[in-house]
Image (cartoon, helix red, strand yellow):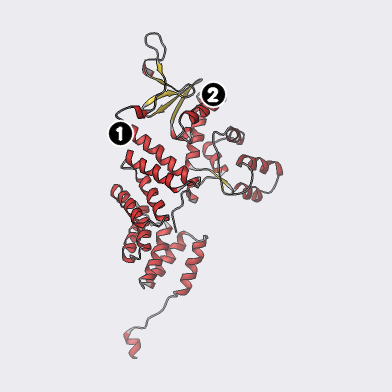
Amino acid sequence: MSEALHSASERFSREQVRRILRLSERQLVAWERQGLVQAKREGGTGACHELAEGNRERGTSRHAREARSAVCYYTFSDIITLKTLLDLRRSGVPPARLRLAHAALKQKLAEVENPWSELQIKGEGKNLTVQFEGSIMEPITGQLLLDYASRNEQDGKVRVQPFQRARDRKKRSLAEKRAIAERYFMAGLRYEEGGGPAEKAITAYQKAVEMNPQAVGAFINLGTIYYNLRQLEAAESCYQAALSIDPGYGLVHFNLGNVADEKNEYQKAREHYEEAIRRDPAYPDPHYNLALVYEKLGLHGKARQQWLWYLKLDQHSQWASHARQQLEKTPLRLIRTTSENTS
């Protein structure tokens, strides 16, 4: 089983988002209509906020409403966006200014897909400021605020200069490099989520690790792209790089086990799956894959134990059905002792 970008644990329903943030349906719909936030969709027709409105208008049963809304979900990034918007509104920033800032930032910073979750944006009254690559910027005009700390000194005015990209600077601080790496990482995720060319996602993740060699997530996602492209050596190199940064990351051991399994290196796969389970016993996937490897190694008793463990953690997926089938193929057998055989 491969690692999905947005697994069930990384998805939030509309009701969950509203409950977490104590957000009204009216406000959520308004921000969706304005394009400030957008739920992900798995199918169906119409925008997600239109489906939500239809749920209210049709007066259907709760089960039917939930079935229609199930095509839409939100990610952790969406929650960050909504929390930022809520904080800015509470600080007094007018809705119209939020819309202007959103459009301006999207135009000026083409590589930033979601300004509200990817940038540090602060508001006070009608004023908005954006921290971008070590500088403070006024989002709508695109001007850098040079003497932000001395706003009340001398004439009380903030000195500004035309916005310039950070590439014109010769040196970047560690914090700036990490911020840039994070944006490249988010860009890579967007390319993958949007079904774009793998080359674009690969380039984005490569730039992320160039700016921040400690970016474990970028190494893992880059390795998974290579794995799906059947470039196993490249995938293994990326996972090993991630492991050198965080030796205790169970997911990395799981991914390395997948690579070894594909290369028919079953003993090596076994070691990685077993280590993944030691690191995170509640993660079901390593139990499943380890059971398959045990079967290949002829260790049917050990395989049975892993099938049983897997079913304790996951009872309802399609993989659970296969695990039950495997258990039926390998029933427990009683082996007679020597004394019983000779009696």
Task: Classify residue 133 by image quadrant.
Answer: top left
Residue 269 x %, y %: 34, 62
Residue 86 image offset from top left, x and y in percent: 52, 31
Q: Secondary structure at mark 1?
A: helix
The image shows residue 180 at horizontal and vertical percentages of 37, 35
Q: Which residue is label 2 attached to? A: 97
Other-residue count near label 2 (Cα within 10 Å), few / some / many at <14 / 14–19 / ≥20: some
Residue at the top extreme, as displayed: 155
Q: Amino acid at mark 1?
A: Leu
Density class for disc 1 (Cα within 10 Å; few <14, some 14-19, many ≥20) is: few
Asked if residue 258 lies left or right of residue 127, the reply is left
Locate the C terminus by quadrant. bottom left
- Left/right of residue 281 with respect to residue 42 in the rendered view: left
Q: Compare residues 12 and 234 and report the one nearer the observer.
A: 234
From the image, tell me which residue sits under label 1: 174
Vertical placement of 254 versus 300: above or below? above
Count every numbered label the image shows and give the total.
2
Q: Decide: is 142 above or below 335.
A: above
Looking at the rendering, which quadrant does residue 155 occupy? Answer: top left
Between the residue at mark 2 and the residue at mark 1, the CA separation in whole angstroms equals 32 Å
Report the front residue among 56 and 228.
Answer: 228
Residue 46 in the figure: left or right of residue 128: right
Q: Is residue 329 above or below residue 163?
A: below
| Residue at x-position 33% and y-position 65% | 265
Q: Position of residue 78 (x, y in %)?
A: 50, 39
Residue 144: quadrant of the picture: top left
Res 253 label: none
* First-in-chain label (2 vs 1): 2
